[in-house]
């Protein structure tokens, strides 16, 4: 007779979570009336909280009432003129962002035709705050940047607003603003400019530019945005002087616009006029990289695939760009990419800037080639570039501990020799990591043993 199976232990009863924590689920148990009483009590004496509550209530009433409340707050900020000291900074930014969120969120859902002009007014208040508030961390600027992004999101939905009024408001901001925020706002709001609003606005901008001996850079940038909206490539190019059109980044901008309307020959001509110089430094410049990308696009559009490939290879040799090399290898026939990759990795070894070469080999990644570069060009890799050397040490520490040790020591030596106090903690960690790699080091290594090096480091009495 089979023995009876033992009874399973009773499952533990899961206790209900305590309701002491202040969270949404627990507060919901209080009920709407209790919560309303609490909110009124908390808001008493706190104007910003009262405004938040009013925004929420007016969002349930309708778009015009909510817009009027947000406008009232914008008017109050613009008309105050008072400085906002650091004690009130956080509350001010939080309050302004709450009004932005209400305009972009609830008001945008109710009526984007009302929301877009309100957000434009909110962004324009940035000029009224100039000189009245310090924003060292860019927290206030982030609110205005987000408002511009909100305008860009809602503008395509705002199809029946007063385009002329909006255009005048945007132009007034461009003329009065001290930053490029006004041009960003114009670009974001452009989809809401219906009918002939763009043409009329462009005409006004042209008049103002013609009346200036030295063109205002913001007005000229606005004119470029408007030229783009009307697809006027020649008008866009005409906003640059002849001496500007020969600069690689400007030539790239003009060429891209020619390509967008199918004018390949004109794009190539614009690029020919603005070719960067032949030196490695000139070819690796950010503007030259933009020019190269535009030229590759133009060559592809012209059917010149071989020349486009040659340009990609030249771009890689100048910049050691991972993206440029991947694009070049992708364009090769089968089985040729392996040999080309080996050639590219070998080229990196002799690149003039050892840091850029090491960063490329780490990003590719090729641990073997990175280790080779470290061992052959180690003296040129000073420890003052931890953003390059530390990721390389991470890549090398398992398979190439000697090369990783060279990099770790270089960074530690730099910290202790020059007393870089902000990196003392990092240096202590690198020293321990170097010690952990000792068992994997070869007996015949061409560097001091760890004990001798550690004693020298200790002599600086920094760590």
Image (cartoon, helix red, strand yellow):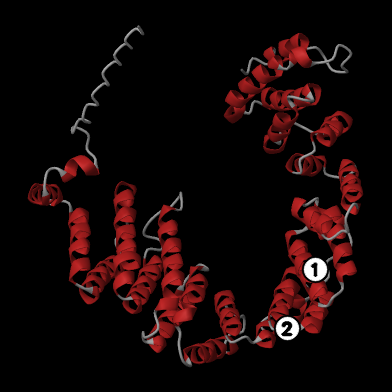
**SS class of the residue under badge 1?**
helix
Which residue corresponds to mark 2?
262
| Residue 104 position (above or below residue 242) | above
Viewport quadrant of the N terminus: top left
Viewport quadrant of the C terminus: top right
Which residue corresponds to mark 1?
296
Image x and y of residue 3, in percent: 34, 7
Q: Nearer the viewer, residue 376 or 28?
A: 28
| Residue 339 position (above or below residue 19) | below
| Residue 139 position (above or below residue 300) | above
Left of 43 or right of it: where is 339? right
Where on the picture, by quarter, is residue 450? top right
Residue 281 makes an appearance in the image: no
The answer to which of marks 1 and 2 sits earlier in the sequence is 2
Question: Are the residues flagged by discs 1 and 2 in contact, CB closer than 8 Å?
Answer: no
Q: Nearer the viewer, residue 30 or 446?
A: 30
């Amino acid at each position: 007779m089979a023995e009876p199976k033992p009874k399973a232990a009773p499952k533990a009863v899961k206790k209900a979570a305590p309701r002491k924590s202040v969270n949404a689920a627990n507060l919901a148990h209080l009920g709407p009336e209790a919560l309303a009483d609490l909110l009124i009590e908390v808001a008493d004496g706190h104007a910003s909280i009262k405004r938040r509550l009013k925004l929420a209530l007016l969002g349930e009433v309708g778009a015009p009432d909510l817009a009027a409340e947000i406008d009232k707050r914008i008017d109050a900020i613009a008309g105050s003129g008072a400085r906002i000291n650091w004690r009130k900074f956080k509350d001010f930014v939080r309050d302004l962002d709450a009004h932005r969120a209400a305009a972009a969120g609830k008001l945008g859902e109710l009526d984007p035709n009302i929301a877009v002009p309100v957000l434009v007014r909110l962004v324009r208040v940035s000029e009224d705050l100039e000189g009245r508030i310090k924003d060292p961390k860019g927290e206030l600027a982030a609110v205005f940047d987000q408002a511009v992004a909100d305008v860009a999101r809602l503008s395509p939905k705002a199809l029946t607003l007063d385009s002329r009024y909006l255009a005048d408001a945007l132009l007034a901001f461009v003329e009065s603003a001290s930053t490029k925020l006004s041009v960003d706002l114009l670009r974001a709001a452009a989809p809401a400019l219906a009918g002939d609003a763009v043409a009329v606005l462009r005409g006004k901008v042209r008049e103002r530019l013609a009346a200036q001996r030295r063109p205002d850079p913001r007005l000229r940038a606005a004119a470029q945005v408007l030229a783009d909206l009307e697809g006027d490539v020649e008008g866009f190019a005409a906003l640059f002087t002849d001496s500007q059109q020969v600069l690689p980044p400007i030539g790239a901008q003009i060429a891209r616009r020619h390509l967008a309307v199918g004018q390949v020959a004109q794009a190539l001509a614009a690029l020919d006029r603005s070719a960067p110089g032949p030196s490695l430094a000139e070819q690796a410049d950010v503007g030259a990289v933009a020019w190269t990308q535009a030229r590759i696009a133009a060559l592809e559009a012209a059917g010149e695939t071989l020349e486009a490939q040659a340009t990609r290879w030249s771009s890689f040799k100048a910049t050691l760009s991972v993206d440029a090399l991947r694009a070049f290898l992708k364009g090769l026939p089968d089985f040729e990419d392996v040999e080309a990759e080996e050639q590219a990795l070998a080229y990196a070894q002799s690149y003039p800037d050892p840091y850029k070469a090491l960063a490329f080999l780490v990003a590719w990644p090729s641990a073997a080639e990175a280790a080779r570069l470290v061992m052959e060009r180690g003296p040129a890799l000073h420890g003052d570039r931890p953003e390059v050397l530390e990721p390389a040490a991470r890549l090398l520490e398992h398979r190439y501990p000697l090369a990783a040790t060279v990099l770790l020591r270089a960074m530690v030596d730099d910290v202790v020799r020059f007393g870089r106090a902000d990196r003392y903690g990092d240096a202590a960690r690198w020293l321990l990591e170097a010690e952990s790699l000792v068992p994997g080091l070869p007996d015949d290594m061409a560097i001091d043993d760890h004990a001798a090096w550690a004693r020298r480091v200790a002599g600086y009495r920094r760590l």
